[in-house]
Image (spheres, grey):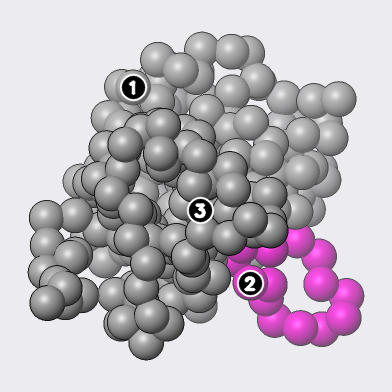
């Protein structure tokens, strides 16, 4: 008899979806042991062929699995018939992010207790696209880099350095000591239109939690507060969308 989903997942986690699995293999930051793929066919598409070839080159155990079983294995995530068993996400230390953020226009994204994997993944995808040096998330009351986050990021999370910290305020202080100016995405009397803030130089962009926004202590430790105008009258944007708008404004200002 074959092993059930609970046995298969023991001692690791399953990244799922074609792009996330391909990017995890390309990034090479995790140790992988086995992979689930559709049965091999002469006419399979190029992406599945690339994944299969890479799995063979790494001598991974290649399995096939019926859809119901694979659905349960990845907790009904959108897997597209592909899943990769790896060790846990390789978090970086804050010092590791700072070491890689030595450029004059370094960007670090700070997550202030976001809990929605879709938002976390979306923001990491944009951060990867604009060349951010890394991201910082708190250890408590926040979504870590789970397989659902990797799926929402289309695998981009595998290429971004992410640090988990006990205290966000202390992390912001350390960023400031290393030459960063901190801008929080929020609203209020002290907020400036996001296009009126000078984003040249080292920037830490703080994204607040869904609904609650940026916490009081974190906000007090921001150098600037940036708001996105909403003449349509809607109260707020999705955190992932707001962060993307701000990151591309940062990129625009830097030419």
The reply to whether residue 69 is in sight is yes
Give the label, 3 or 1, closer to the camera: 3
Gap between marks 3 and 1 measured at Cα: 24 Å
Of residue 65 and residue 182, the one placed in the foreground of this image is 65
Q: Would you call the spot at circle 3 few (<14 residues within 10 Å), some (14-19), or many (20 or more)?
A: many
Q: For residue 1, which quarter of the picture? A: bottom left
Q: Closer to the observer: label 1 or label 2? A: 1
Position in image of residue 92 (x %, y %): 31, 32
Locate residue 147, reporting x and y percent: 37, 61
What is the secondary structure assignment of the residue under circle 3? helix
Say if mark 3 contacts mark 2, CB within 8 Å.
no
- Determine which of the numbered discs, if any, sits on residue 238 in the image: 2
Q: Which residue is mark 1?
A: 96
Whole-angstrom CA distance, mark 1 to mark 2, is 30 Å
Residue 146 inside the magenta-drawn segment = no
Name which residue lies at 25% across and 58% down: 13
Q: Along the line of sight, which residue is nearer the eye, 245 or 177? A: 245
Lateral position of residue 125 relative to residue 17, left or right: right
Task: Give, as a single range, the part of the protein colored magenta.
Answer: 222-241
Q: State which mark lies toward you, 3 or 2.
A: 3
Majority secondary structure of magenta residues: loop
Q: Residue at x 58, y 43 (%)?
A: 50
Residue in view at x 81 percent, y 65 percent: 229
Question: Disc 3 designates what residue?
Answer: 20
In the image, residue 194 lies at what x, y percent?
A: 76, 49
């Amino acid at each position: 008899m074959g092993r059930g989903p609970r046995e298969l997942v023991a001692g690791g986690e399953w990244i799922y979806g074609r792009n996330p699995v391909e990017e995890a293999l390309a990034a090479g930051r995790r140790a992988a042991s086995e992979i689930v793929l559709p049965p091999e066919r002469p006419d399979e598409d190029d992406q599945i062929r690339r994944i299969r070839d890479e799995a063979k080159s790494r001598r991974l155990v290649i399995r096939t699995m019926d859809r119901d079983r694979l659905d349960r294995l990845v907790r009904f995530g959108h897997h597209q018939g592909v899943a990769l068993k790896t060790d846990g996400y390789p978090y970086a230390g804050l010092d590791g992010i700072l070491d890689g953020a030595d450029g004059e226009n370094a960007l670090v994204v700070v997550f202030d207790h976001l809990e929605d994997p879709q938002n976390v993944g979306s923001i990491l995808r944009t951060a990867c696209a604009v060349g951010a040096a890394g991201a910082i998330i708190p250890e408590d009351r926040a979504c870590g880099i789970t397989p659902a986050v990797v799926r929402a990021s289309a695998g981009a999370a595998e290429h971004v350095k992410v640090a988990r910290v006990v205290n966000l305020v202390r992390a912001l202080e350390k960023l400031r000591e290393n030459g960063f100016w901190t801008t929080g995405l929020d609203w209020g009397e002290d907020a400036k239109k996001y296009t009126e803030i000078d984003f040249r130089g080292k920037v830490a962009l703080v994204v607040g939690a869904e609904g609650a926004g940026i916490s009081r202590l974190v906000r007090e430790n921001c150098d600037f507060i940036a708001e996105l105008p909403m003449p349509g009258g809607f109260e707020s944007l999705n955190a992932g969308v707001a962060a993307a708008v701000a990151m591309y404004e940062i990129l625009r200002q830097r030419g």
